[in-house]
């Protein structure tokens, strides 16, 4: 394994930024680790916490501020850990509670904060509460923790309403005594009833369990779900809606201010969810060191999403409208300004994100040649296969643009290597419930979850020592391996490192955007403090002003910015 010099590491991240009075989360870069696929210390083909711990120095070297770990709690893994049976323990496939405690401590020693992924909308069907609910009678307190209802029709054999699961099929499953239970996702993920005080108290306690162990905050799964409209009225989503909600409004058709006439959706973004986040905020605020909440809330428009980050709610929310914006100058300019306005209006930082474990990796997504609805994934038979070279070029330009923006940014493991989506996974290797629930009609998300390559010439590309891998790794990934790119000028890894170092040096995360007009229709151009940024999304090269080049996403000769490229210049 590569040795990394960590002598510059801070002893405790909580002392480095809070001392500066900066509220670290306003400008942080948070790296998403998908534990199944990051690093596997025991060679069983599934990543684990000790694997993550060993590789932490490389994240420190990359220059991120924190890591967010997708769920590592006890789980039957029907939805890759987003189906939890015990929120206070670590699944044996990932290690032990002691391993988690050690990982948190080692991350802190390296100056990295650690964010856990809390999954409150639903539990696993193997959770003791759900097993008790199944054993109990209709109308019992055990059933009242979940959403059980009688069916429709004379014999109750029709589901209580017409809602469709995010993963396909009905949102309802019938149990032996004839009642039905609701699950926004897979039938192995029954939704909790968040109007039940016992549910609320339990999660406050779970938060404290991890906060007591030093966790720095929580990414909150489905933070726009949780509450369902009284009476559970029928609802048919618009055809153009995203699978997780949102997507109903053109991401570029954005309102500049908070509006109160939000659509009364029966299960996404109900106004009552905000009470929950206020409650959670008081819990994290009980702890020293600025522990944070980051919400996964797929709601449109941005002005509405900003409600999740009002001063007494969460600290950050993922900016999915930004992620969903195509690589087009005017659209990007609009979404950036609308984000800054919307989040600024509530005193919150905007965040920026291009990839995660639910979407097609941006090195492929930005060069698709046919539309691809979020959640569908791409596979061997999908129309519009991405053009690989163009995708990587655009991904590098898009990241260079993103990391120059003020606010928080998220990086998904492997994007710093320029990894594309793994498209040609064999059918029998696929594991996403979406694939099964749609009978293979939607490929789902496995293609962005393949274990990442560390060493070009090692079993499983250094993911472990045995060569086992829970999803097969493409045979042509050696050029993406970390050791192929480390120290190599012009590599994607070095581009990320340089961008992160410059972002820190120039304090871009706490800066402001001043647009530079007149650079051309496809060009996004702005000044952020001591740096000017030009991103050319058009098809033809454009002229660049004279200036010292600080960063370039591709080879750039003086005076000209080629298509699909971004540069940072020292501002005059
Ligand atoms: C959102 C998570 O990001 C996704 O991976 C998961 O399948 C659903 N929530 C259900 O928990």
Image (cartoon, grey):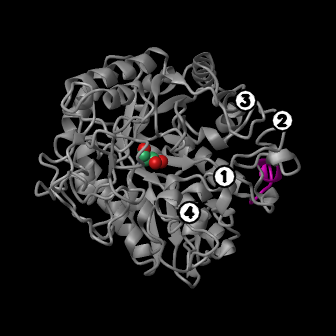
Q: Earlier in the sequence, mark 1 or mark 4?
A: 4
Q: Are marks 2 and 3 in contact (CB under 8 Å)?
A: yes
Q: Secondary structure at mark 1?
A: loop
Q: Earlier in the sequence, mark 2 or mark 3?
A: 2
Q: Which residue sits furthest bottom?
A: 540
Image location of residue 135, percent across then percent down? 33, 27
Residue that appears at 24% across and 65% down: 236
Q: Earlier in the sequence, mark 2 or mark 1?
A: 2
* Total numbered labels: 4
> Vertically, is 554 above or below 160?
below
Q: Would residue 572 be seen by someone viewing this image from the given angle? A: no
Choose top left, top right, bottom left or bottom right for residue 228: top left
Q: Secondary structure at mark 2?
A: loop
Q: CA distance from mark 4 to mark 2?
A: 28 Å
Residue that appears at 47% across and 63% down: 438
Q: Looking at the picture, tell me which residue is in the foreground, 100 or 566.
A: 100
Using a 10 Å C-alpha cutoff, classify the residue at mark 1 as few (fewer than 14 neighbours), some (14 to 19) or many (20 or more): many
**Of the numbered discs in the image, which one, if any, rests on residue 1?**
2
Q: CA distance from mark 4 to mark 3?
A: 27 Å
Q: Which residues are magenta?
A: 482-490
Q: Would residue 113 be seen by someone viewing this image from the given angle? A: yes
**Of the numbered discs in the image, which one, if any, rests on residue 362?**
4
Q: Are marks 2 and 1 in contact (CB under 8 Å)?
A: no
């Amino acid at each position: 394994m590569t040795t990394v010099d960590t002598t510059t590491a801070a002893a405790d991240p909580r002392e480095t930024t809070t001392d500066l009075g900066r509220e670290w989360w306003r400008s942080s870069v948070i790296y998403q680790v998908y534990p199944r696929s990051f690093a596997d210390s025991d060679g069983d083909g599934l990543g684990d916490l000790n694997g993550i711990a060993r590789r932490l120095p490389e994240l420190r070297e990359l220059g991120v501020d924190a890591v967010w770990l997708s769920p590592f709690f006890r789980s039957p893994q029907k939805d890759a850990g987003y189906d939890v049976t015990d929120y206070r323990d670590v699944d044996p496939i990932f290690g032990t509670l002691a391993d988690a405690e050690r990982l948190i401590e080692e991350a802190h020693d390296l100056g990295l904060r650690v964010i856990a992924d809390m999954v409150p909308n639903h539990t696993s069907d193997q959770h003791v509460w759900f097993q008790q609910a199944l054993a109990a009678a209709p109308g019992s307190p055990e059933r009242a923790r979940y959403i059980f209802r009688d069916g429709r029709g004379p014999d109750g054999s029709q589901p209580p309403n017409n809602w469709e699961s995010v993963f396909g099929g009905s949102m309802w499953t019938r149990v032996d005594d004839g009642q039905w239970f609701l699950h926004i996702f897979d039938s192995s993920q029954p939704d909790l009833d968040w109007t039940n005080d016992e549910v609320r108290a339990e999660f406050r306690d779970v938060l404290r369990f991890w906060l007591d162990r030093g966790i720095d905050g929580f990414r909150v799964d489905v933070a726009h779900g949780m509450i369902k409209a009284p009476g559970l009225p029928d609802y048919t989503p618009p055809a153009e809606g995203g699978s997780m909600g949102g997507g109903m409004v053109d991401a570029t058709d954005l309102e500049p201010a908070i509006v109160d006439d939000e659509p009364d959706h029966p299960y996404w973004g109900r106004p009552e969810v905000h009470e929950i986040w206020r409650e959670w905020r008081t819990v994290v605020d009980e702890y020293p060191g600025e522990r944070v909440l980051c919400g996964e809330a797929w709601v449109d428009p941005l002005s509405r999403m900003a409600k999740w980050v009002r001063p007494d709610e969460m600290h950050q929310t993922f900016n999915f409208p930004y992620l969903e914006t195509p690589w087009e100058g005017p659209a990007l300019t609009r979404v950036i300004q609308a984000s800054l306005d919307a989040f600024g209006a509530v005193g919150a930082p905007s965040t920026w994100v291009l990839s995660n474990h639910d979407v097609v990796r941006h090195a492929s997504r930005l060069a698709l040649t046919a539309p691809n609805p979020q959640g569908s994934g791409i596979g061997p038979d999908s129309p519009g296969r991405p053009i690989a070279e163009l995708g990587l070029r655009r991904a590098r330009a898009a990241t260079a643009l993103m990391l120059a923006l003020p606010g928080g940014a998220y990086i998904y493991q492997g994007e710093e290597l320029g990894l594309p989506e793994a498209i040609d996974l064999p059918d029998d290797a696929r594991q996403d419930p979406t694939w099964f629930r749609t009978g293979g009609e939607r490929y789902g998300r496995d293609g962005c979850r393949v274990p990442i390559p560390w060493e070009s010439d090692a079993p499983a590309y250094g993911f472990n020592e045995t060569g086992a891998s829970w999803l097969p790794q493409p045979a042509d990934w050696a050029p993406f391996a970390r050791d192929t790119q480390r120290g190599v000028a012009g590599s994607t890894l070095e581009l990320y490192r340089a961008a992160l170092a410059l972002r820190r040096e120039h304090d871009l995360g706490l800066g402001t955007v001043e647009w530079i007009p007149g650079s051309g229709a496809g060009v996004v151009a702005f000044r952020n403090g001591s740096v000017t940024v030009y991103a050319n999304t058009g098809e033809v090269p454009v002229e660049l002003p004279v200036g010292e080049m600080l960063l370039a996403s591709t080879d750039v000769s003086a005076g000209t910015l080629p298509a699909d490229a971004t540069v940072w210049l020292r501002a005059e």
